[in-house]
């Protein structure tokens, strides 16, 4: 089980801040492919991956990152701190 | 505490005074504070979302990187989340060093990294409704100089 | 007052708070403060001499140049003279702008020019007696980037 | 009559912060040549002109600056503000 978190407009489009996902996806990109099949909202949220960043266990990483042993994956738009 | 993430306002003057007083050996203190711009009255409010847990980790990491790269006697970051009004303080950084160049460079580095590498997202509420603030290309480009 | 030359100490926290509160439309405030370093206890005091009249003119000129070159909503300078003890504040600058880069660049410009173009001279009193602080070659070189 | 001001170690070497000088010197450099004849202290203070800066009527300038109409000339070492 992986906790999948959503922030900002991705959270709004999917309609939930968090969901628990049973998955055998090997990488973040594989997980995204699975998530897109969950609902039209998911498919829409993930339609332009260039606008999405990912953190795995709270570290910023790439869509190619492996998922073995991972507990938490978060998707969000480019950050706008400061 | 060198890194603080909070929804409550902070007292910039008191923070700067305390930071400066506790910077032994420093000859230079630089501070930056970010405020909600009023955009000529068109902005009514801002809401900052963040990623609890990762936010603190990211800020600690950015601060540690600054302390490792420059000769600093101290560095601190405060960043707020939640609802804010025009004119309110969003965040601040402060750096202390023996020499001014280290203090300035480290403060600019902290800001450049905070902008693009700390998990905060700003939503603006204005005459046109709600808008998520888009990241700027030049904020990403600003990282390349370090 | 945007430029102040005084022997009395100033309250950095209060100055920063007041400057920030009176910077309408600003999104970024940068401050720099210079402190008397204790040099590991070897410095017992500092005395700053200045050129009354020319000092104010020079500071006004440097401030006006900064305001002309960057998009600032405000800028201020406070510089002390007379006797100071280790850890005391010597001076501060503050800049306010819509965007952080203008505020940072203008603050660094103000400092670079204050170092070499404002008529202050520092004398240090330490274990080895009295020494006039020598200007650094790289302080002069720092002006060339502007 | 021109007011001549000295600061920092130049003031200390000459022993006075200010003196009034009757001069027909055309430039700052000419004035310096006159001042050096005033005393050994003056000659010593002005022995290394590379270490001295000058302001004429409170504006920083060069040793070649003309003196006509000038009321105040100040000599001092490189400034160390900030």
Image: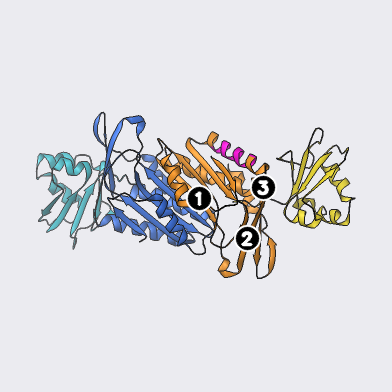
Chain colours: A cyan, B blue, C orange, D yellow
Instruction: Give the SS element for disc 2.
Output: strand
In the displayed structure image, the side of residue B94 where residue A5 appears, left or right:
left
Q: Quadrant of the N terminus of chain A?
A: bottom left
Any mark on residue C46, and which?
A: 2
Sequence-earlier tag: 2 or 1: 1
In the displayed structure image, the side of residue C23 where residue C83 appears, left or right:
right
Badge 2: few (under 14), some or many (20 or more) residues near its Cα, within 10 Å? many
Q: Residue at x 61, y 44 (%)?
A: C144
The answer to whether any part of residue B69 appears in the image is yes
Sequence-earlier tag: 2 or 3: 2
Q: Residue at x 38, y 44 (%)?
A: B34
Question: Does residue A73 lie above or below D66 as drawn?
Answer: below
Question: Does residue C25 lie above or below B98 as drawn?
Answer: above
**Viewer-proximal residue, C2 or A65?**
C2
Instruction: Give the SS element for disc 1.
Output: strand
Disc 1: which chain?
Answer: C
Magenta region's main secondary structure? helix
Spot occupied by residue A79 in the image (x, y as percentages of width and height): 30, 46
Question: Does residue A23 lie above or below B139 as drawn?
Answer: below
Find residue D13 and report its image quarter. bottom right
Q: Nearer the viewer, mark 2 or mark 1?
A: 2
Any mark on residue C119, and which?
A: 3
Any mark on residue D63, and which?
A: none
Sequence-earlier tag: 3 or 1: 1
| Disc 3 to disc 1, C-alpha distance | 19 Å
Disc 3: which chain?
Answer: C
First to last magenta residue range: C57-66
Same chain, marks 3 and 1? yes
Any mark on residue C32, and which?
A: 1
Name the residue at the front extreme: C8
Instruction: Give the SS element for disc 3.
Output: loop
């Amino acid at each position: 089980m992986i906790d999948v978190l959503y922030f900002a407009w991705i959270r709004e489009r999917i309609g939930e801040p968090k969901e628990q996902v049973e998955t055998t996806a090997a990488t973040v990109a594989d997980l995204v492919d699975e998530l897109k099949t969950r609902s039209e909202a998911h498919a829409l949220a993930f339609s332009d991956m260039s606008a999405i960043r990912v953190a795995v266990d709270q570290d910023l990483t790439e869509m190619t990152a492996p998922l073995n042993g991972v507990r938490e994956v978060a998707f969000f738009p480019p950050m706008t701190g400061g | 505490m060198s890194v603080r993430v909070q929804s409550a306002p902070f007292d910039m003057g008191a923070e700067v005074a305390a930071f400066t007083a506790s910077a032994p050996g420093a000859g230079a203190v630089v501070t930056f504070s970010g405020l909600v711009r009023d955009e000529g009255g068109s902005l009514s409010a801002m809401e900052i979302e963040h990623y609890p847990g990762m936010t603190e980790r990211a800020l600690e990491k950015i601060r540690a990187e600054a302390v490792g790269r420059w000769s600093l006697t101290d560095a601190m970051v405060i960043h707020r989340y939640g609802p804010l009004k025009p004119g309110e303080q969003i965040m601040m950084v402060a750096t202390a060093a023996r020499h001014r160049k280290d203090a300035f460079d480290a403060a600019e580095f902290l800001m450049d990294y905070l902008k693009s590498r700390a998990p905060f997202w700003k939503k603006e509420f204005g005459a046109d409704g709600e808008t998520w603030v888009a990241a700027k290309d030049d904020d990403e480009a600003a990282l390349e100089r370090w």
